[in-house]
Amino acid sequence: MAYLGKGDLYYSYTNLVNSIDNYQKAASINRTRITLFIKSNWGTYFDAGFPEKAKQYYQDGLKLDGDSSAYYERLSDFEFWLANFNKSIEYAKKV
C-alpha cells in the first residue's frame, strides 16, 4: 500500500516515471491488490504517452474482476481522450 500511495503522490506532482515505477512495485509485492492497481492507475500510462499500455492494463483488470460495465465506461473515456468521439459514444452505450 505504501508503494501505491507513493505512486499516487508522484502522479499528483506529474512525475509520471516515478509514479509508474512505484505502481509496478506495488503490484509485484501485493498480488491481492493487483486489480486495484491496474484499474486505478492505468491513466498514468496514458498521461505518460503510452495509451496502448494503458488499454492493456485495463483489459487485464477486466480479466481479473469481470466488471464489463466499468471496462466499457473506461474505454469510453479512453476513446474520448483520443478524440475518437464516435467510438467513445459506442462504448458509453454499452455501459
Image (tube, helix red, strand yellow):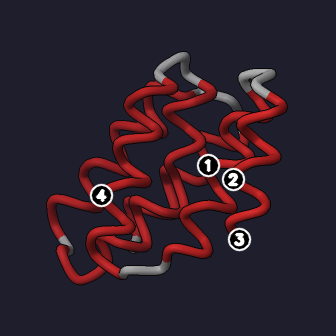
For mark 3, what is the residue? 95
Q: Quadrant of residue 79?
A: top right
Which quarter of the rendering shows the N terminus?
bottom left
> Residue 2: horizontal and vertical position, in percent?
40, 68
Label 1 residue SS: helix
Evaluate if marks 2 and 4 touch, with contact meaning CB atoms under 8 Å apart.
no
Left or right of 43, for residue 38: left
CB under 8 Å between discs 1 and 2: yes
Residue 75, numbered circle: 1
Kindly identify the residue that appears in the image at 36 percent across and 65 percent down: 61
Q: Please name which of the two marks, 3 or 4, marks the residue nearer to the observer.
A: 3
Q: Which numbered disc, 1 or 3, marks the residue closer to the eye?
A: 3
State the residue lying farthest toward the top. 49
Label 1 Cα crowd, 10 Å radius (few <14 / some 14-19 / many 20+)? many
Per the model, the C-alpha gap separating discs 1 and 2 is: 6 Å
Q: If you read the primary sequence from the N terminus, does the residue marked by circle 4 or circle 1 appear first?
A: 4
Q: Which residue is mark 4?
A: 60
State the separation of the CA atoms marked 2 and 3: 7 Å
Q: Dots 3 and 4: beta carbons under 8 Å? A: no
Which residue in the structure is indicated by mark 2?
Answer: 91
Inspect the image, locate mark 4, and give the three-letter code of the amino acid beneath it: Asp
